[in-house]
Image (spheres, coloured by chain):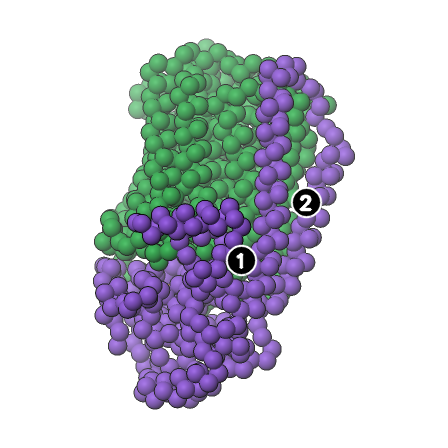
Amino acid sequence: MSDHTPTGWKRWAYSTNHKDIGSMYIMYAVVMALIGGTMSMMIRLELAEPGLQFLEDLHFYNVLVTGHGLIMIFFVVMPGLIGGFGNWFVPLMIGAPDMAFPRLNNISFWLLIAATVMLILSVFIGGGAGTGWTMYPPLSNSLFHDSASVDYAILALHLAGASSILGAINFITTIVNMRAPGMTFHKMPLFVWSVLVTAFLLVTALPVLAGALTMLLTDRNFGTSFFAPEGGGDPILWQHLFWFFGHPEVYIMILPAFGIISHIISTFSRKPVFGYLGMAYAMVSIGAVGYIVWAHHMYTVGLGVDTRAYFLLATMLIAVPTGIKIFSWIATMWGGSITFETPMLFAIGFIFLFTVGGVTGVVLANAGMDIMMHDTYYVVAHFHYVLSLGAVFSMFAGFYYWIGKMSGRQYPEALGKLHFWVTFIGVNILFFPQHFLGLAGMPRRIPDYPDVYAGWNMVSSIGAAIAGFGTLIFLFVIYRTFTAGEKAAANPWGEGAKTLEWTVSSPPPFHSFSEPPQFDAKPEAAE
Amino acid sequence: MLSKFNWFIFSLVALVGGLPFQAHAQMAHPWQFGFQGAFSPSAEKLHEFHSLLTVIIISITLFVLGLLIYVVLKFNRKANPVPSKTTHHTLLEVVWTAVPVLILVVITIPSLRVLYFLDRVEDADMTVKIVGHQWYWSYEYPDNDDMTFDSYIVDKEDLEEGQPRLLTVDNALVVPAGKNIRLLMASGDVIHSWAVPSLGVKLDAVPGRLNETWVKVNEPGTYYGQCSELCGVNHGFMPITIKALSEDDYAAWLLEAMEEFANNDNDNKPLKIASLQGKASVWEGSNE
Ligand SMILES: [Cu+2]
């Protein structure tokens, strides 16, 4: 086959190939994760003991908190799950030759690099943004952050947002138009479903963020006062706009994780996904309800009590489809013939840890109860359980599940399992005590804390060190995979792996399918 | 170090023995697992509701964990070499949709009650206006000639015996115990949040807005809290101390305070601007 495969740096810089772009996204996410992770290690180092030990400059502490949040959300989880695994496996799973708009795909990736440059500039010009990733005005207004740092951070998010919107348009078009003959929506693999819902969320939520960011930018530079009370504006307006984007954003990060986990559970249980349609529509309803719950991030800003009552009720609803997903995964395993390779370990770990993060979410949904929890470490523990232990576990699961397919080389199984156990133990020691700290009243985003909180903070920091060690093991796994990994078969997982990516070689040819594969096996929805 | 260790042992003993944690009720204590003590009707209601929530969420978590363990033991390749083909079970799917809805109803009803109870008080005995600043609080007593004073953190070196670091202020908010107090929140610069966990109060102080909540401190004592919304460099260093006094003591304090703070006027205080070069020392010695 004449592939016209470009070579050298051009293959990557000019790439329009979904697999190459996917690989770049994944490598990019790993690098950014190391940066964001280093920031969190610095935070945990400072918080290991009461008093100020390592960070003299308290503004820098706030910059770390801000940078860690922004990087992990916009530059690790989103590019890793959507840009990385989405790009690689959506076309493969639906039997498409590539994404619908290959050049758009290229722009999406390089816009993200431009965004990263902006974010880095924001740290080095004017000392960085110490606003938290939520960038609440007036703190983010020019009166309180008078250097260009916040402007650079805003532009970084603008570019990252544009990158994601373009990517999302690409995914929607690809999924709607390029499925293999016979693959109706109701036979589409669940990962494709998850990316489709995620892409809709991106296309609709990100423009709201872009609008809000632009308003903040003009407030800062051109004398408008959308969010400035002295000019008749309202800082709470920012919070409404931000969280109208920000809550769907949470699902943007977790829905692709749901998709990945479904495939892994099914593959290693050697059974089709239980309740396929329920699973698909649970994701759709989580996405839909995600638009109408945003103010549960704002229970203490002074909203009217009836408004809070509404958001309490709406937020509670999300527990139902989430429960359906958890129970369906377990039902998929029920009656299965399960083996416990590394991806499966991460997937089972995901189910349990996501449950822990989910039930504390139910606690936080209660507007009254939230008065005790809001802005404490309880919230920090909650969202790290769903994101750091949820989304990130799914990324590890996906990495181990697909690395053989992507690179043609299989990871070393024993090292992978070691990585899982060290990480699992580390993150639990790291984040579980934070529930106690939060219940006891420790506020988040503080560089020093009253001495009574010393004990659990030390435990938490020890957990961080263990999790950090786990990351080193992961890097070693990558190294061993590429230097000494066994050649991966087209399908290393056997009978359970039924989606189309396992029908092509590992790694797949530059153009995966020269003609559309016939799709009648109905892998997901076998009746 | 030794005392930390002792606390750890004590906590373990207490946990095993099921002793209630009430040692230093007004503030947290080392190795604490749950809430601080409850010293207001709001906090009591929240504690009661949280007990219900805790039972529910721990049961759910253990249930899921139990299922996972069962599945792992029972349906691994050795125990079950031939996988079943089941992918549907309508009754089961209806059950795991309906049961969570029922659980949510059980949660939601008391939740709404607590929410409305906490919101505000109809018949307040007095009002205190709380204004957040970078990085201190000021307290105004509109019922008492608009008496106003500022409340700054006390630096570590100036702490007296028994005063907790990072929680002690020079001028605490003083209120009478047993009275319904309306709290009004505002801010002079960025958003802050006034929070006292043992009293079940947390409300943002937002510039351009006047937020309202209430508190009734059950008994005389000292209660602590911290700013709970990122407000800049010294966000971690603008604590809240609230002293509740008996009615007589409060009356006596009020006489003295009105004299002491007679010349304070919050309106012409210069707006403090965040210093990007802010160092740990910014809050030191900022007492007026
Ligand atoms: Cu503050």
Residue A230 sits in which quadrant?
Answer: bottom left
Q: Name the residue under label 2.
A: B100
Q: Can residue A166 be seen in this view?
A: no
- Residue with the most extreme right position: B91
Against B263, is A212 above or below?
above
Q: Mark 1 points at which residue?
A: A370
Give A288 or A397, whichever is nearer the viewer: A397
Q: Is residue A467 visible?
A: yes
Against A265, is A122 above or below?
below
Residue depicted at 56% across the width and 80% down the height: B124
Q: How crowded is mark 2: few (under 14 residues within 10 Å), some or many (20 or more)?
A: some
- Quarter of the figure that contains the C terminus of chain A: top right
Chain A shade in the render: green
Q: In this view, does A198 lie to the left or right of A117?
A: right
Task: Chain letter for mark 2, please.
Answer: B
Q: Are marks 2 and 1 on the same chain?
A: no
Q: In this view, does A490 lie to the left or right of B271?
A: right
Against A205, is B39 above or below?
below
Against A450, is A69 above or below?
above
Q: Does the residue labelled 1 lie within 8 Å of ligand 1?
A: no
Give A201 or A424, whichever is nearer the viewer: A424
Three-letter amino acid code of the residue under disc 2: Pro
Q: How crowded is mark 1: few (under 14 residues within 10 Å), some or many (20 or more)?
A: many
Chain B shade in the render: purple
